[in-house]
Image (tube, helix red, strand yellow):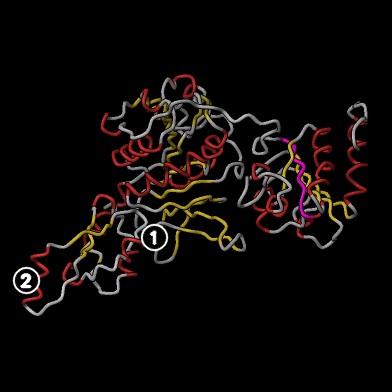
Amino acid sequence: MRITLDECIGCGLCVKACPFAALSMADRDPAEVERAKAEGRKLSRRIVVLEEDKCNLCGACVDVCKSGAMDIDRPAAEAAAPAGLDSYSGVWVFGEQRRGKIQGVALELAGKGRELADSLGAPLTVVVLGHELDSACEGLLKFPIDEILQVESPQLAQYRSEPYSRVFADLIRKRKPEVVLAGATTIGRDFLARVAIQLHTGLTADCTGLGIGSVAGQGERLLLQTRPAFGGNIMATIVTPRHRPQMATVRHKVMKEVAPGAPPSGAPPRVTKVVPEAEHLACRTRILDFVEEIEDTVNIAEADIIVSGGRGLGKAENFYLVEDLARVMGGAVGASRAAVDAGWKPYSHQVGQTGKTVQPKLYVACGISGAVQHLVGMQSSETIVAINKDPGAPIFGVASYGLVGDLFEILPVLTREVEARRGRSGEGRT
């Protein structure tokens, strides 16, 4: 970034526009102001100051600068990008773990990562960060992974964004993977964005599809990163042609978990233990205690059966119809965005683009029309049953079975039938 201080008028617009807090305002030397005045030049009494280590060369300040004092040093910007893209090889998956247990989203990404690695003719590596990870990494040995990077330190025992992002970025700089994937979880969204900034590369968030291909004029061996855009009304495919690694976070439950098996080499995965450098483990925060959320309902992201309600229920009090059916089926209760926005159910129950992506064995949609934002979150379910009085509702386009009729008549009958078949007592509001 280049700043021409003689042109700076001290308006402060660039400070407000900078998303990385790299700019601030300071007083100019009064003697300099007086000297300029004597020479017939006018200088502002305030000037902008740049902290270079925070600057990401995004250009936001250049766009708002009225005086032309801000400019990006293009050679410096090019130097910030990785040189020699051909030197990058391999597909990495961030093996997210919590309390020593590998999370399901990591196994989903390992399955897709295997496909991508085979398309590229490159190895697949799962990177696990934490402490005392022997058991977690042993559990990965049965899957078709070429290498497991086991990165251990007591400072990594619980997730904190600063050390995790620094350690991961340092590994990438040294080993140069071509593709890096992480789950679009609370952890993945937080730390992988920090990694991308440190590496001056791109990151596509919340992907629902990945592939390898070429784009005319952009190159080959590109990671095709597909995600909903414009409120879910279109599906955009994004590429990162000039920077490496190509990075993406992927929504949970949009891909199948990897099946056990051997990698293409036929050899079992090799485990490489890595001790991170001490300078990357420093952190300005510390965890005093960890309190796990206690829920009285099934987590919809992990449920095999989900019964969801939408605007067709009319009001919050009618959600008991959905809850009763979910209870007798041993499933979880979901909701459309319309139902959540209306305050009928808390956000933790929302299924869709702005809620949770689910992939149950059975998904029952009650009074949900099937807006594309909702379909994105549940269309990968094995079996979909739709109940709606509108025969033209979009939900029927993805449903395995459709019931056209009044849900207030259908749900009580369906609940009683399921309960009877399961030998339940039949007591309750149904």
Q: Nearer the viewer, residue 13 or 58?
A: 13
> Most extreme residue toward the bottom, as rendered?
40
Residue shown at the point (68%, 43%) measured from the top left: 349
Position of 335 with respect to 21 (left or right) is right
Q: Secondary structure at mark 2?
A: helix
Against 89, residue 216 (above or below) is below
Where residue 164 appears, as percent x and y from the top left, is 38, 35
Quadrant that contains the N terminus? bottom left
Where residue 51 appears, as percent x and y from the top left, is 24, 53
Position of 429 with respect to 282 (left or right) is right
Q: Secondary structure at mark 1?
A: strand
Q: Alpha-carbon neighbours of circle 2 within 10 Å: few (<14), some, or many (≥20)?
A: few
Residue shown at the point (58%, 60%) measured from the top left: 235
Q: Is residue 306 magenta?
A: yes
Where residue 192 appears, as percent x and y from the top left, is 42, 44
Residue at the spot of label 2: 35
